Structures are given as structure tokens and as C-alpha cells.
Image (cartoon, rainbow, N blue to C red):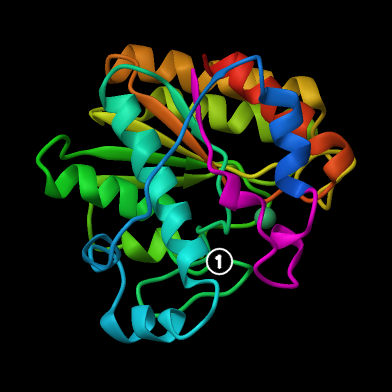
Amino acid sequence: MKVVYHEKYKEVYSGDPAARAGRIESIYDELYGQFEFVEPVPSNEGDLRLVHTQSHIDSIKRRKLYGNALLAVGGAIKASDLAMEGEPAFGLIRPPGHHASPSSCWGFCFFNNVAISVEKLRKDGKVWRAFIVDIDLHYGDGTASVFASKPEVSYYHMPGGTREEQLEKPSNHLSGERGYEILALSAGFDRHEKDWGGILKTRDYEEIGKMIRDCAERECEGRRYAVLEGGYNHSVLGKNVKALLRGME
Ligand SMILES: [Zn+2]
């Protein structure tokens, strides 16, 4: 399991909770020394165009955080490349991406990191069918809209409900999904009992990670990667990420 990380992810690029000071550090401190870290390079406009309209790209380009957003996309691409090489990976990236649609964005997102990384693998002929699982508290409307007319890529958002339901339903759904060549995880941690969702326990993330690993091993020769989406309580975020990676590795 490798962690894709860049010092610039620590930069506070806006006033939203995903960009808050100390958030990336809270994860870095838990993971550093436990996993091998690798550095990504920024993405480019050509990659963005795989998913986004030119007018959306131009609207973000006018903002100071454009460089941060390009580096987040680059981190997702790096994680997906590692997964293709047989190395599970986690993109410790921000800004997040799953609320970014082709021509709009909201919810602290600008470009859809996971969607672009999947589309790049597909464009390069490395995979055709992909499965994206999203465990963030919030529905990834951006990711869903990117792939609405592309049946080769399935998007599944973990449903709400009790803690037991939240763990059981994905397990059933994931075991029924077939035929994909890579499994990508939008890893949000805001369902945690001490985060906005107030439900999941830290050890549940390890269970989810194992679920992802088992499905990838059964279906796509183990090719799997995750990228950071939400998760806002710095006192538990790092531990939750580490639990997920321990399960996924
Ligand atoms: Zn969220």
C-alpha cells in the first residue's frame, strides 16, 4: 500500500472545511512511517477535459486554487497508475472531487479527481470497465453525473441507515457487481461517530477496506485505489484513514 502525497496538499487554499489548516497533517502524522509515500505531479488541462467542459475549466483557472486542484487530480492519477501496476494506493489529496460535475461544482470540490483518473485509464486503453465505490457521507453527484451515460463505469454510493445497515448493504452490493477491471474508492470519512454523520466507528473503516480488497482480488486481480474526499474532525481523521488502509492493503 503506497500513499500518494505532496507537501502542497497542506496549503490552505480556501476557507472551506476541506481546506482547513491541520487537516492533511492529521492524516500525514498517522500514516508517515507506516506506509511508503510517493509524490505525484500536477495534472494538465488535457486530463481535465476527459471529464470537464472548457467553460468549467476556465472558471476554475481564474482562481488561485487552480494549481492545488491540478495537483489533487495528479494525485488521483498517480494512485490509479500504482493500482494498475499491482500496488494498492491511497491518494492523500485535496481539494476533494466527488461533487464536481462536467460543467459545475460545489461542496468544496473543483475537479472530479476520481472520475478523471478512471477516464484517463480508459482513454489510455488500460481498462474499459471500472467500478467506483463512494463511502463519503454525501452522495457523489458529480461522479454519478460524469458516468450517467457511460454504462462501462458503475458508481455506487454507500447507503445511509443504521451502522449495521451501512456496513451490510455495501457488502451485498459489492459482491454482486461483476466484470470491472479496476476498483476505485472515493474515501470520505465524514460518517464517523465523531464527524458530521455520527455513525461509523474507526474499526468499521478497516472492515470497509477489507471489503474493497476482497472484491478487487476476486474480480480484477486486486487492482484497487482510494482517494480522499470528506472527513472533517482532525482528532479522528488520521486514525480512520489508517484503519481503511490497513484493511485495504
Ligand atoms: Zn462528505
- Nearest the viewer among 15 and 164 is 15
Q: Tell whether 209 sits left or right of 156.
A: right
Q: Amino acid at mark 1?
A: Cys
Q: Tell whether 119 sits left or right of 246.
A: left
Point out residue 21 in the picture as x, y percentages from the top left corner: 79, 56
Which residue sits at x=70%, y=45%?
A: 24
Which residue sits at x=64%, y=26%?
A: 168
- Circle 1: element type: loop
Residue 15 in magenta? yes
- Nearest the viewer among 21 and 131 is 21
Residue wearing tag 1 = 109
Image quadrant of ligand 1 equals bottom right
Point out residue 179 in the picture as x, y percentages from the top left corner: 23, 28
Q: Is the residue marked by circle 1 packed among few (<14), some (14-19), or many (20+) residues within 10 Å? A: many
Q: Tell whether 150 sits left or right of 1.
A: left
Q: Tell whether 151 sits left or right of 17.
A: left
Residue 247 in magenta? no
Point out the stretch of residues depicted in magenta: 1-22
